[in-house]
Image (cartoon, helix red, strand yellow):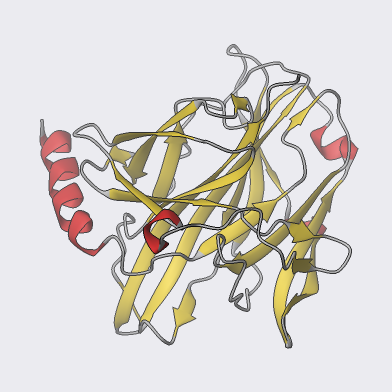
């Protein structure tokens, strides 16, 4: 009962301020998350505004970069540090050059069948224009060989979106569901921002493609705002193939850093795939 009261109190508080750091996303881009067999996994990590393809911001070396892995339902999850594979790169945004990261995760590191929850716990970023720090606990999931695993597992992050559908197995138009968590507790009636990756990365040039995939007829359609229910759950039907970012803002427990407001956000990336003709 006390846990429910705590979760409800957090939800009411955070619903008021949940959009204070609107539209920032830690992008964790890899071309394909449903792999038929083990292979090298390239990943680009950029801090930006997703639908508009910018502006992009400098991103310092993450505090942590790792995956948790599990094969099937009857094994224990294991954690593997991925920071040794991070390489700083220059990301281009118009005439600006920003600090971003690339990781080439070798096949041998992700060779087993099953689910891999890849996690970034970044350094807090000082957002000068908004006068606050932003720290986004971000996840993307990769599956090898179609064998299930720990895709449903909560990792106990300060701010987290727990998937209720496999994030790597969604047809275009299908409904994705998740739960917003703060230190493992559901956050009811808090807002979730959903954005389409409208400018996919050009990995050869280290930049987002200039031409958008779609044109939104109204600003309210650039970032779709939905709410969790009393159990912290949300759902969203993804109308177009590609990458969709889900952000629950200001749901983590910490509120202050260096005397300034700190927004601890939860990010989850979901890939939608067109039905074959």
Instruction: Give left or right: position of 274 versus 47.
Output: right
Quadrant placement of the N terminus: top left
- Residue 156 visible (yes or no): no
The spot of residue 55 in percent (x, y) is 58, 76
- Going by the picture, which residue comes out furthest to the front? 217
Quarter of image, res 15: bottom left
Look at the picture and state if 119 lies above or below 235.
Answer: below
- Viewer-side residue, 198 vs 229: 198
The spot of residue 198 in percent (x, y) is 62, 56
- Going by the picture, which residue comes out furthest to the top? 74
Quarter of image, res 244: top right
Q: Residue at x 58, y 13 (%)?
A: 73
- Residue 69 visible (yes or no): yes
- Viewer-side residue, 154 vs 26: 26
The spot of residue 49 in percent (x, y) is 54, 67
Instruction: Give left or right: position of 9 versus 21.
Output: left
Look at the picture and state if 200 lies above or below 73.
Answer: below
- Viewer-side residue, 220 vs 98: 220
Q: Residue at x 53, y 36 (%)?
A: 239
The spot of residue 189 in percent (x, y) is 20, 44
Quarter of image, res 50: bottom right
Instruction: Give left or right: position of 152 versus 265.
Output: right
Q: Residue at x 23, y 64 (%)?
A: 17
Count of marks, rendered view: 0
Quadrant placement of the C terminus: top right
């Amino acid at each position: 009962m006390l846990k429910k009261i705590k979760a409800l109190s957090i939800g009411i508080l955070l619903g008021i301020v949940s959009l204070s750091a609107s539209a920032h996303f830690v992008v964790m881009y890899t071309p394909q998350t449903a792999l038929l067999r083990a292979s090298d996994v390239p990943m680009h990590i950029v801090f930006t505004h997703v639908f508009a393809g910018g502006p992009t911001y400098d991103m310092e070396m993450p505090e942590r970069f790792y995956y948790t892995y599990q094969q099937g339902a009857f094994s224990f999850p294991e954690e593997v540090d991925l920071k040794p594979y991070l390489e700083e790169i220059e990301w281009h945004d118009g005439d600006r050059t920003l600090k971003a990261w690339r990781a080439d995760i070798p096949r041998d590191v992700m060779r087993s069948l099953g689910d891999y929850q890849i996690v970034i716990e970044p350094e807090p970023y000082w957002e000068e224009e908004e006068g606050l720090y932003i720290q986004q606990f971000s996840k993307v999931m990769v599956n090898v060989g179609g064998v299930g695993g720990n895709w449903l597992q909560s990792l106990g992050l300060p701010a987290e979106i727990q998937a209720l559908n496999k994030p790597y197995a969604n047809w275009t138009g299908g409904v994705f569901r998740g739960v917003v968590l703060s230190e493992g507790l559901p956050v009811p009636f808090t807002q979730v921002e959903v954005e389409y990756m409208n400018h996919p990365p050009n990995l050869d040039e280290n930049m987002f493609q200039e031409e958008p995939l779609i044109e939104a007829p109204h600003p309210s359609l650039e970032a779709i705002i939905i709410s969790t229910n009393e159990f912290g759950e949300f759902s969203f039907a993804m109308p177009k193939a590609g990458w969709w970012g889900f952000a629950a803002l200001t749901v983590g427990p910490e509120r202050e850093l260096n005397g300034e407001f700190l927004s601890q956000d939860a990010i989850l990336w979901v890939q939608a795939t067109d039905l074959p003709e």
